[in-house]
Image (cartoon, rainbow, N blue to C red):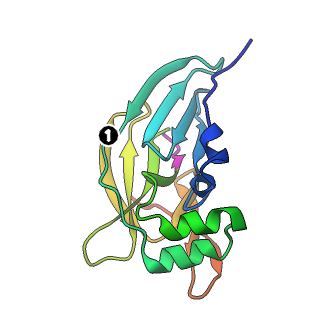
Amino acid sequence: KRLFAMDVSSVFTKPELLYFGNYVNWELTSDDKIIVGKSDAYLFYICSSDGNIIKEFRKDYDPARISPEEREREMGWAEKSAKERIRHMEFHKAFHSFTIDGKDRIIVRTWQKRKGRTDYDYDVFSPEGVYISRFCGKCIIKKWIDGRFLAVEELPGATSAVKVYELIN
């Protein structure tokens, strides 16, 4: 039996899709659903554990310009075949990455920044894909576990740190 399939062949003709965050991301929910996100279109699929699409949802977004600092950082680890295209890219993909929290809410790290801030916006969706809210944060949230989340925070220079944050009500 063939499970959910998605065409990702465009990475072979557009290697820049592999940079500035994940191109395709997926998470498994507590009730064994599979959430798949495609960052070039702000497109999500919610699938059953046997691979059938239960729901598809998209979000409109305003493209965020790539800053010179972001471009320079990405060029540092880009493959030679992608560097020229990255150099000419004006805008980011729709989102950087996503994760889910302990209640299976979908937390999407966007490329949007609020005026005068350096941290990025996160969009929050219900497990059914309904938009709930937005918050901003400096780190890239990787995993939520029992009211805490693991995140990667970029430090000055070219280093990063993994940090654990606890949410207090």
**Residue 98, percent from left and from top:** 52, 49
In the depicted structure, whether residue 24 falls above or below residue 147:
above
- Total labels drawn: 1
**Residue 41, percent from left and from top:** 43, 42
Residue sitting nearer the eye, 22 or 156: 22
Residue 17 included in the magenta stretch of the image: no
Instruction: Return the residue found at the far bottom.
Output: 157
Quarter where residue 130 is shown: top left
Q: Amino acid at mark 1?
A: Tyr
In the depicted structure, whether residue 81 falls above or below residue 7:
below
**Residue 50, percent from left and from top:** 66, 17
Residue sitting nearer the eye, 97 or 130: 97
Q: Residues within 10 Å of mark 1 (few under 14, many from 20)?
A: some
Q: Is residue 42 left or right of residue 14?
A: left
The span picked out in magenta is 98-103
Q: Residue at x 62, y 37 (%)?
A: 8
**Residue 37, percent from left and from top:** 52, 40
Q: Is residue 127 left or right of residue 79?
A: left
Instruction: Return the residue found at the far left.
Output: 115
Quarter where residue 110 is shown: bottom left
In the depicted structure, whether residue 162 falls above or below residue 16:
below
Residue behind mark 1: 131
